[in-house]
């Protein structure tokens, strides 16, 4: 996942939480970048046809943007689940955030064969908790 995919993932999740367009301020906050950086990347994503941005209304993903965002979320889930289920990494969220931008789709696909991903992925992703919902279910089941 590259920086563009990180932005698409953030926009997708913000839209899920806010049930509408994502403000550039929310995008900047989510990715811990400056509002100027978020505006610049939104412009680049708009040039590629992945988002539409209407000033003062926010950013919406196009159909192509939604597909790429969902793929990015799925790869992120694969990495998260691999880290916790196979490697038993305690701070898996932080590690997944670090690894997601540098792991390509081929590696994610190979990790996927190890974790036996559920078919509902990426719809299982909990935007509020910023974690795979299946991991939350497994943690709740262990209590």
Image (spheres, rainbow, N blue to C red):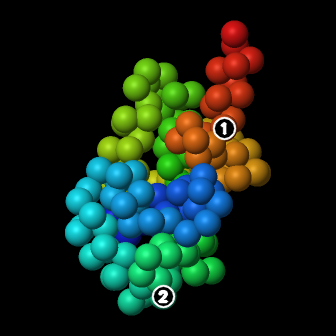
**Most foreground residue, 43 or 9:** 43
Location of the N terminus (image quadrant): bottom left
Residue count near mark 2 (Cα–Cα under 10 Å), binned few <14, some 14–19, many ≥20: some
Say left or right for 25 vs 106: left
Classify mark 2: helix, strand or loop: loop
Residue 136's image quarter? top right
The mark that comes first in sequence, 2 or 1, is: 2
Q: Which residue is found at the position 53% from the left and 41% from the top? A: 130
Classify mark 1: helix, strand or loop: helix
**Where is residue 19 drawn, in percent x and y?**
65, 60
**Circle number at residue 49:** 2
- Residue 104 visible to an observer of this rendering: no
**Disc 2 to disc 1, how far (Cα)?**
30 Å
- Residue farthest along the top direction in this orientation: 143
Q: Which residue is found at the position 63% from the left and 43% from the top? A: 126
**Where is residue 121 drawn, in percent x and y?**
69, 51
Q: Establish if 98 lies above or below 58.
A: above
Q: Establish if 47 lies above or below 142.
A: below
Location of the C terminus (image quadrant): top right
Residue beneath disc 1 = 133
């Amino acid at each position: 996942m590259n920086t563009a995919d990180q932005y698409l993932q953030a926009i997708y999740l913000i839209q899920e939480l806010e049930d509408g367009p994502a403000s550039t301020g929310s995008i900047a906050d989510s990715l811990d970048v400056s509002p100027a950086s978020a505006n610049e990347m939104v412009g680049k994503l708009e040039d590629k046809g992945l988002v539409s941005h209407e000033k003062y209304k926010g950013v919406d993903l196009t159909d192509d943007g939604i597909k790429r965002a969902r793929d990015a979320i799925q790869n992120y889930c694969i990495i998260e689940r691999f880290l916790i289920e196979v490697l038993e990494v305690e701070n898996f969220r932080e590690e997944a955030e670090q690894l997601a931008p540098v792991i390509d789709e081929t590696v994610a696909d190979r990790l996927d064969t190890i974790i036996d991903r559920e078919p509902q992925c990426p719809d299982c992703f909990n935007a509020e908790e910023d974690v795979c919902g299946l991991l939350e279910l497994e943690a709740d089941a262990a209590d």
